[in-house]
Structures are given as C-alpha cells and as structure tokens.
Image: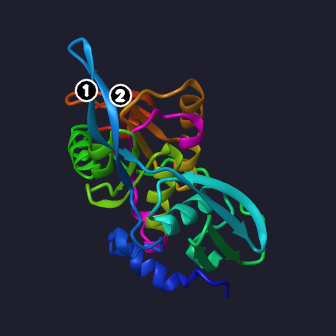
Amino acid sequence: METGMQTTRLRDAARKAASHDEKTQPQPDGVRLACPMTLQCYKDGQLSFREDMVAVESDIRLQINGLDHAVLTRTPGDDLTLIAGYLFSCSMIRDAEDLLDVSFGYSGASKARVTLKAPSVIRRLFPSPRPVVLDPERLFDFKKTFERRQNLYRNTGSTHAAALFSMDGELIAFGEDVGRHNAFDKAIGRALLEGSLERVGIAMLSSRLALELTIKASNANIPILCGFSAATSSGINFAERNNITLVGRIREDSFNVYANSWRLKGSKGHQSE
C-alpha cells in the first residue's frame, strides 16, 4: 500500500457514516472546512478591513479500478460519502456492495482509489409513482430542520446543502459542500452506505432545481424533490415525465409546485385513496 494511503473497508465505512460524525470520515488530519481571511468591506461609503471565514475548496483525484476517472472539486471532509454518492448518481454502482475497497491519500494532492466489482451495465431506474402523500405544511418544518444543519453556510455564506427525509420527517442524511451537486451526492452517499436510501421520500436542496439534480433524485428513487430556489424548464419536464413531485422557492409560508402535485394532500391533483 502506498505511503499516506488510508484503506477503508465498506462495512466499517458504513458504520462510520452512520455515526454522522465528520471526524470519523476518511480525511486528512486537521482538515479545515473553512479558513479565516482578512478582507475589505464597503459600508457607509467607505472601505474597511475585517476578518471573515471562507469555505475551503480543493480537488480530489478519483481513480477507479486503476484508471484515472475524474477530478472532483469539493469541500474537504466526507470524501467517502461524496464518492459513494457520485458513483451511484453516475450509475456506476447499484449499492454499497459494489464498492469493494476505497483508499484515500492526502500526502500532496488528495486522491481516492476505488475498486469496484466487475463492470456491468447498470440500468437507470426511474421511479414509478410511489403511493406517498405529504401534508404540504410539513415542508416548512423540513425547511427549519434543514437550516439548523447548515453550519458551514452560517460560517461562510458560500456553501450548498442537501437533506434527505423520510415521509414521517426523520432526517436520514445531510450533505454540505461548495458545490450543489457534491452536497446532494454526499447526502445520497451517506444514505447508501447506511442502507437507508430506500427510506428516503423527500430530498431538499438549497439550490435551483436543474435537470442534473432532478436526474440524481430519480436515480435514487426519491419521489419528492424540493428546493429553496426555482426549477428550470428541463428539470420540470424531466420531473413531469418521471413522476417526481417538484417543489421550489420554499419560503416561510409559501412554495411553488412545478410537477406532480398529486402527492400533496389538498392539491387539485391529489389522488385520494
């Protein structure tokens, strides 16, 4: 094994991911998610110096079965959940069992070496209309839970987040990163490693609901996708065709429904049993 590489067996990795403790994730010692800097602030007609915190952004090189695959620009930490979610979202793995071994190296440039089972064609499984119905008022409770978990955003103001909830409101997984795709992948990866992805009914994102993120929700068979920002035309069209309820622009007492409102109790499209 290369010096500086840290091998992670998936059974142990799943247990660590389930702890929700960032310090247990494979990552360099003393990793910093944010760092202080001196900047100039313009206020009341003048510039002045002040201290602030900025989110850390760095690359990790991903190698799969001995071949270079991609370079991910991410917030350090939670690298295992990020890679698991990324590979799942790319349809390169079906579940945690497809990950035979993951090794991390942080001496010099960060890198991750992943050993997968023998490659096979993994069909994208878009969700059928799952018989789930949500009281729309619950979304405001989910939003409050979501915002309480955004520690890095409160410190820096420059990160995205993703939360996965069960239909009864349990927070199953949470991810935070400078990249909106990474944040969603971290949340999906954590749920995948814990074996709890099938329990997810709702995904909530801090970002706009673009096509790529809607596809991630579909691959994970998540029937309800919500966001603080608006949806895009491609995201709406995909959600409509693939039975995803798409909710955006969530505020304190309102939101927009872009597709498949029948899952929301009391809507005109709601199908009562």
Q: Where residue 168 sits in the image (x, y, percent)?
A: 26, 56
Q: Residue drawn 39% across and 69% down? A: 30
Question: Do labels 2 and 1 touch, CB within 8 Å?
Answer: yes
- Which one is in front, 97 or 198? 97
Mark in the foreground, 2 or 1 = 2
- Name the residue that disc number 1 marks: 254
- Name the residue that disc number 2 marks: 249
Q: Circle 2: is it few (<14), some (14-19), or many (20+) Cα within 10 Å?
A: some
Q: Where residue 241 sits in the image (x, y, percent)?
A: 59, 36
Q: Is residue 202 magenta?
A: yes
The label shown at residue 181 is none
Q: Earlier in the sequence, mark 2 or mark 1?
A: 2
The residue under label 2 is which amino acid type? Answer: Arg
Q: Circle 1: is it few (<14), some (14-19), or many (20+) Cα within 10 Å?
A: few
Q: Is residue 150 above or below residue 5?
A: above
| Res 65 seen here | yes
Q: Residue drawn 44% across and 38% down? A: 245
| Res 128 seen here | no
Q: In the rendered view, does 254 fall on the left or right side of 39? A: left
Q: Secondary structure at mark 1?
A: loop
Magenta highlight range: 193-213
Q: In the rendered view, does 72 fall on the left or right side of 168? A: right
Q: Quadrant of residue 191?
A: bottom left
The residue under label 1 is which amino acid type? Answer: Ser
